[in-house]
């Protein structure tokens, strides 16, 4: 775990979860279900296609952390363990109630491990 990443990651996860739970309550009267998907690390180029923001006015106390974060960001593309195709097949099964989700109760939240 990268130092200082905890507050960012936890606040992002909490915000997405709460937004989805709120939407589920608000949309339930219209018979619309909400699925909150929390993916792990998957081989996609979205985040890694952008240059890591090195900021225009860096704080010297964070130089070591910033250097480690940049190195990690640049070494990631194509090495994430999760298969995005398998992950989306899982999501489609859940939404349709087929395959791995056949006969199961609707799950509001799906955590996609990197072995999906």
Image (spheres, grey):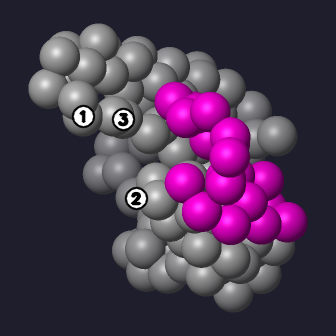
Within 10 Å of disc 2 (Cα), the crowding (few <14, some 14-19, many 20+) is: few
- Residue drawn at x 77%, y 66% as measured from the top left: 116
- Residue drawn at x 43%, y 74% as measured from the top left: 46
- CA gap, disc 2 and disc 3: 33 Å
Q: Describe residue 17's horizontal placement relative to residue 41 as left or right.
A: left
Q: SS of the residue at dot 1?
A: loop
* Number of the label disc, if any, that sits on residue 62: none
Label 1: which residue? Answer: 32
Give the mark toward the camera: 1 or 2. 1
Q: SS of the residue at dot 3?
A: loop
- Residue drawn at x 59%, y 23% as measured from the top left: 10
- CA gap, disc 1 and disc 2: 38 Å
User: For the N terminus, which image quadrant?
Assistant: top right
Asked whether residue 82 appears in the rendered view, the answer is yes
Which region shows up in magenta? 97-116
Q: Are marks 1 and 3 in contact (CB under 8 Å)?
A: yes
* Number of the label disc, if any, that sits on residue 53: 2
Q: Nearer the viewer, residue 47 or 55?
A: 47
Q: Is residue 34 above or below residue 94?
A: above
How many callouts does the rendering have? 3
């Amino acid at each position: 775990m990268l130092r200082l990443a905890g507050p960012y990651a936890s606040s992002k996860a909490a915000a997405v979860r709460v937004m989805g739970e709120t939407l589920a309550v608000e949309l339930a009267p219209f018979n619309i279900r909400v699925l909150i998907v929390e993916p792990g690390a998957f081989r996609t180029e979205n985040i890694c296609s952008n240059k890591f923001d090195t900021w225009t006015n860096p704080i010297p106390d964070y130089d070591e952390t910033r250097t480690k974060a940049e190195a990690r960001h640049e070494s990631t593309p194509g090495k994430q363990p999760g298969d995005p195709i398998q992950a989306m097949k899982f999501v489609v099964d859940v939404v349709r109630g087929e395959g791995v989700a056949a006969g199961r109760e609707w799950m509001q939240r799906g955590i996609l491990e990197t072995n999906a």
